[in-house]
Image: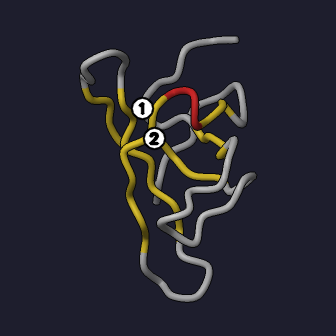
Amino acid sequence: MRSLHVDDRVRLIDDVPETDLVRGRVGVICSQWKGDREPLFEVEFNSTEHDDVLRLLLRSTQIQCDVDEPVAID
């Protein structure tokens, strides 16, 4: 498995209970942050009901790369 990078399209491995995001939702990594034990990734998800976006800081264990090529956000 390759490492994660900014602009990678990623898929949630598990539900995020405090949001409406469920396993399998696809988002794009916007930035990477240094965490205490592991890097954190700010991932942007499009809202399913609005034109809004939701950004979350997630651990690499919560996401997996969805494609091999980086994807730019419009």
Upstream in sequence: badge 1 or badge 2:
1
In three-dimensional space, the C-alpha distance between marks 1 and 2, rounded to whole angstroms, equals 5 Å
Q: Amino acid at mark 1?
A: Val
Quadrant of image for the N terminus: top right
Residue at mark 1: 6
Q: Quadrant of residue 53?
A: bottom left
Q: On residue 59, which mark appears?
A: none
Residue at image location 32% in from the left, 37% down from the top: 31
In this view, 19 is above or below 28: below
**Which residue is depicted at the point 36% across and 45% down?**
57
- Percent coordinates x, y for residue 3 in the rendering: 55, 14
Q: Position of residue 35 (x, y in %)?
A: 27, 24
Element class at badge 1: loop
Secondary-structure class at tag 2: strand
Left or right for 28, reference 11: left
Residue contact at pointers 1 and 2, CB within 8 angstroms:
yes
Other residues around mark 1 within 10 Å, as few (<14) / some (14–19) / many (≥20): some
Q: Quadrant of residue 16?
A: bottom right
Residue occupied by mark 2? 29
Count up the numbered dots.
Answer: 2
**Percent coordinates x, y for residue 21 in the rendering:** 60, 64
Front-most of 19 and 44?
19
